[in-house]
Image: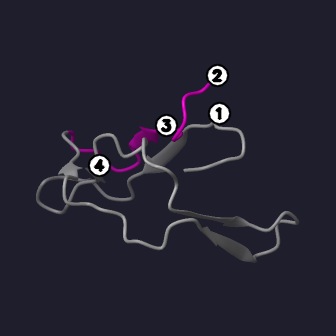
Amino acid sequence: MWTDRQNVVGFWFAIDDVTTVNGRLWVKPGGHRPPVGSRFGRTENDAPTMWTEVHDPAPYPVDDSVPAKADCRHAGPVAGHPAEPVP
């Protein structure tokens, strides 16, 4: 997740239960440290138009990604932090 001010936290809500049987979220330890490869957003006037900004077209490496340790019940939130430290 990216914003011009890195002071937000993102939440993901499961529609169904998330378990080892039906698939878990995967995380990349330290994945918040490399530079941003690309980002997308909505136009300023909130029209249904999106924009994409690509900084590095190389595929994001996922070889060292690991499954999240916890199962998540439906409607359970999972929090994510910004890529940069919050001042």
- The earlier-in-sequence mark between 2 and 3 is 3
User: Tag 2's secondary structure?
Assistant: loop
Magenta stretch: helix, strand or loop mostly: loop
Label 1: few (<14), some or many (≥20) within 10 Å? some
Residue 40 vertical placement versus 18 (above, below): below
Residue range corresponding to the magenta coloring: 70-87
CA–CA distance in space, label 3 to label 4: 12 Å
User: Residue at the spot x=73%, y=66% of the render?
Assistant: 42
- The earlier-in-sequence mark between 1 and 3 is 1
Residue 54 vertical placement versus 34 (above, below): below
Residue 78 vertical placement versus 50 (above, below): above
Instruction: For the residues labelled 4 and 2, say whether their Cβ atoms are less than 8 Å apart.
Output: no
Q: Mark 2 sits on what residue?
A: 87
Q: Mark 3 sits on what residue?
A: 81
- Left or right: 47 with respect to 81? right
- The earlier-in-sequence mark between 4 and 2 is 4
- Left or right: 49 with respect to 19? right
Quadrant of the rendered image containing residue 78: top left
- The earlier-in-sequence mark between 4 and 1 is 1
CA–CA distance in space, label 1 to label 2: 8 Å
Look at the image and tell me in which quarter the C terminus lies: top right
- The earlier-in-sequence mark between 1 and 2 is 1
Residue 41 numbered tag: none
Q: Mark 4 sits on what residue?
A: 27
In the rendered image, residue 73 lying in the magenta stretch gets the answer: yes
Toward the viewer: 2 or 56? 56
Amino acid under disc 4: Val
